[in-house]
């Protein structure tokens, strides 16, 4: 059944070209600068370090999109550290552009304040080919007040934290990773690494994992349990689970398993620097192959928690059409082509064949130095992963495993619920500041949680955490009553 579903997804691409051609002719003379003789220029802002070969790649992109949808594309990348501020300034100032990458709470808040266009009608017309292919859970989970405001990347819909290990060290000390089920189970291995590997930091800084369906993000206190009273929002920093995890991290910190400046360090622990033993990250099927390719040495992962479909996981990569776009139909034409046309998707993702990568006889690809040096785009930000070429060494069943991974995940209790923060905006601002003050130190184990966690929760109480919990519960109950 799963393979049949994936087969349907892939076979549907064959019908897309004709549909897009007819759509482009219909919308070519719409508003803006589009006409049969003058292609509309789509302004697209997305996330990532600007690449020196972007202009070269988009010369090829624009030859293709001009032919297919009578449009050209100007893609501008905003670097990781600048993204939050620069993207929000563009939106708040009312700058005219067509498409922007967004995710998580930023997506919800900007949709609620009218910065993004509701695309339900466009998806039924210009985007019909896309709607037929995308995982319905992605569309359901990204509805805001009953409407859809962006196209989520069609990839894994589940979220799962995993512990990732340097396999050379695992093999050297014959560690049995099958015994690792909890954060606490890491301790014997960390001790051995600390005592024997002076150049290795046992833990590449991560926050203590606490498994809840989080309303905002892991640093904020509002969450629904996966078990028990799943419809009751709580402050998860008041739970025994949180205290247990934070105490363990504090023991690890005192033992020297983390860097002394873990709470404030900007170290991002790049994979290609072999100075760590274990780290935590989000998983997708065969992620170890991607990470090993990036690291240029082998890594291995095990689950830190069961996979779950939550608001955070379905909204991690979205392309939204700006409310300031002069030609939303043309923007949807492009997003549909990007997500349904293998040639265009691979061109934007991987660059130019023969320049940035080579293709083998079996259809698999291998990066050339020019891609790493001049055109290294974060794939997860773009769109439909299922039509990307496989790398040499990738398992042939990779996309089938994505389907299985998604099907195996549990649904979070609040999936699809979008909180409107206006009634408690001042309280949330105060809580955010308090969280920034306390959470990094507590979650990295840098301070004693038995002393600081009560202080943290006391400050949250004073800032109005109970009022926010009451408002979340009220809105959740109202939303839940409308669900079938």
Image (cartoon, rainbow, N blue to C red):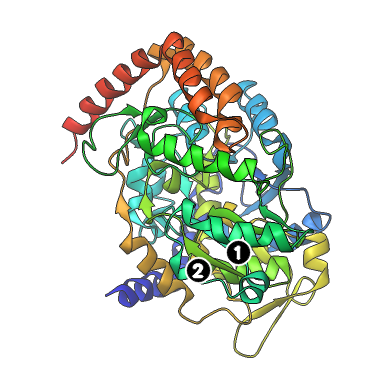
In which quadrant will I find the C terminus?
top left
Image location (x, y in percent) of residue 89: 67, 24
| Visible residue check, residue 85 | yes
Which badge, 2 or 1, is on the more N-terminal residue? 1
Dot 2: what SS? helix
Q: Which residue lies furthest to the bottom in this view?
A: 361
Q: Where, by quadrant of the figure, is residue 226 drawn? A: top left
Q: Residues within 10 Å of mark 1 (few under 14, many from 20)?
A: many
Q: Distance between the residues labelled 2 and 1?
A: 9 Å
Image location (x, y in percent) of residue 20: 48, 60
The numbered disc on residue 54 is none
Task: Provide the residue designation for mark 2.
Answer: 177
Q: Where, by quadrant of the figure, is residue 399 drawn? A: bottom left
Image location (x, y in percent) of residue 362: 60, 89
Q: Residues within 10 Å of mark 2 (few under 14, many from 20)?
A: some
Image location (x, y in percent) of residue 32: 61, 37
Q: Which residue is drawn at 59% across and 51% down?
A: 381
Q: Which residue is drawn at 36% across and 47% down?
A: 139
Taking the image as shown, residue 380 lies to the left or right of residue 89, namely left
Q: Residue at x 66, y 70 (%)?
A: 169
In which quadrant will I find the N terminus?
bottom left
């Amino acid at each position: 059944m799963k393979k049949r579903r994936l087969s349907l997804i892939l076979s549907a691409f064959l019908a897309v070209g004709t549909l897009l051609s007819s759509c482009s002719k219909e919308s070519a003379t719409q508003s803006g600068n589009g006409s049969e003789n003058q292609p509309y220029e789509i302004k697209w802002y997305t996330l990532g370090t600007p690449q020196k070969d972007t202009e070269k790649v988009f010369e090829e992109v624009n030859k293709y999109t001009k032919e297919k949808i009578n449009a050209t594309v100007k893609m501008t990348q905003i670097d990781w550290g600048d993204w939050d501020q620069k993207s929000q300034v563009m939106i708040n100032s009312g700058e005219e552009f067509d498409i922007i990458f967004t995710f998580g709470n930023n997506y919800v808040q900007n949709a609620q304040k009218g910065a993004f266009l509701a695309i339900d009608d466009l998806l039924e017309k210009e985007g019909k080919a896309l709607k037929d292919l995308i995982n319905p859970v992605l569309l359901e989970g990204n509805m805001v007040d009953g409407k859809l405001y962006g196209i989520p990347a069609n990839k894994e819909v589940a979220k799962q934290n995993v512990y990732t290990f340097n396999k050379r060290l695992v093999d050297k000390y014959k560690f049995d990773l099958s015994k690792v089920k909890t954060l606490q189970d890491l301790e014997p291995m960390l001790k051995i690494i600390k005592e024997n590997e002076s150049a290795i930091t046992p833990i590449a800084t991560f926050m203590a994992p606490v498994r809840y369906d989080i309303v905002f993000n892991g640093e904020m206190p509002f969450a629904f349990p996966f078990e028990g009273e799943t419809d009751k929002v709580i402050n998860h920093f008041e739970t025994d689970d949180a205290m247990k995890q934070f105490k363990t991290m504090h023991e690890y910190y005192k033992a020297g398993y983390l860097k002394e400046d873990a709470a404030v360090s900007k170290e991002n622990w790049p994979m290609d620097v072999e100075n760590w033993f274990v780290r935590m990250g989000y998983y997708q099927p065969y992620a170890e192959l991607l990470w090993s390719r990036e690291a240029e040495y082998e890594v291995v992962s095990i689950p830190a928690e069961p996979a779950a479909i939550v608001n955070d996981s379905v909204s991690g990569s979205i392309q939204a059409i700006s409310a300031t776009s002069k030609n939303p139909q043309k923007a949807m034409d492009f997003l549909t082509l990007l997500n349904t046309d293998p040639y265009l998707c691979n061109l934007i993702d991987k660059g130019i064949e023969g320049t940035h990568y080579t293709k083998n006889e079996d259809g698999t690809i291998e990066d050339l130095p020019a891609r790493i040096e001049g055109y290294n785009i974060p794939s997860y930000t773009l769109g439909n992963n299922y039509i990307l070429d496989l790398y040499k060494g990738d398992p042939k069943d990779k996309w089938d495993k994505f389907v299985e991974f998604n099907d195996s995940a549990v649904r979070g209790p609040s999936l699809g619920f979008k909180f409107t923060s206006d009634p408690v905006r001042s309280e949330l601002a105060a809580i955010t500041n308090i969280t920034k003050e306390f959470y990094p130190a507590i979650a990295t184990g840098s301070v004693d949680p038995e002393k600081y966690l009560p202080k943290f929760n006391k400050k949250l109480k004073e800032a109005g955490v109970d009022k926010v919990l009451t408002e979340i519960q009220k809105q959740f109950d109202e939303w839940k009553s409308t669900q079938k």
